[in-house]
Image: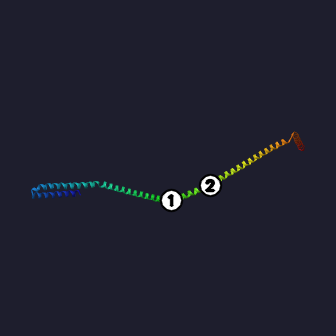
Amino acid sequence: MLLACTLWGATAASAASSWHAVAWAAAPEQEEQSQEAAKERHELYFKIINFTLLAVALGYLLRKPLAEFFAQRSEGIRKALEEGRAALEKSQAQLEAVEEKLKHLEEEIAAFKASAEKEMEAERKRLAEESAREAERILETARVRTDSATRAAKLDLRIFTAQQALQLAEQMIRDRLDEAARERLVSQFIATLGSEEKRN
């Protein structure tokens, strides 16, 4: 390819030279203008040829590194796409799992509420029964204490009544008995004790 470009440049240069010769012979005034134009064209051709040669040389030299770069770049893009696809599938699976949980969440909440209400009702009944039993125990204890206090009061009242009756009887006996009657009673009592001792 380099040889072809060189040949093309030489052909173009010779064609330009021959054209110069014809133009120079035709008009001496246009000779300077045509020489300048030919010079500019000649320089343009050389610039094109140089650029083409440089591009071909760079393409040849950078062919392997560019191929490796683009291969690595395409491999990196392919890996990134695969990772993105895997992450997308994973996130979709997680989203489906969350949606499934959300579907059953209302049912679970309703079941939890029903269970909590049953437990609260059972606890309320248990507390009511326990309170009733405790109240019954308290009432029974109060009855027992009241009965005991009543019996004790009745007993105290009987004792007090008996003591008062005894004191009253004693007072009445004292008032009715004179000294002689007392002596007679004491002697009868002593005689009764003596007869009891003889029997024993």
Left or right of residue 147, residue 98 in this image: left
Which residue is pictured at 19% across the width and 55% down the height? Answer: 44
Left or right of residue 168, residue 36 in this image: left
Q: Which residue in the protein does label 1 denote?
A: 106
Residue at far top of view: 179
Query: Where is 173 relative to 88, above or below?
Result: above
Give the x, y percent position of residue 20: 13, 57
Query: Where is 32 relative to 181, above or below?
Result: below
Q: Nearer the viewer, residue 127 or 36?
A: 127
Left or right of residue 92, residue 56 in this image: left
Q: Which residue in the protein does label 2 denote?
A: 128
Rounded to the nearest whole Å, what is the CA distance between mark 1 and mark 2? Answer: 32 Å
Q: Which secondary structure lies at badge 2?
A: helix
Q: Label 1 is placed on what type of residue? A: Glu
Q: Nearer the viewer, residue 117 or 180?
A: 180
Q: Which secondary structure lies at badge 1?
A: helix
Give the x, y percent position of residue 73: 34, 55
Which residue is pictured at 40% across the width and 57% down the height? Answer: 84
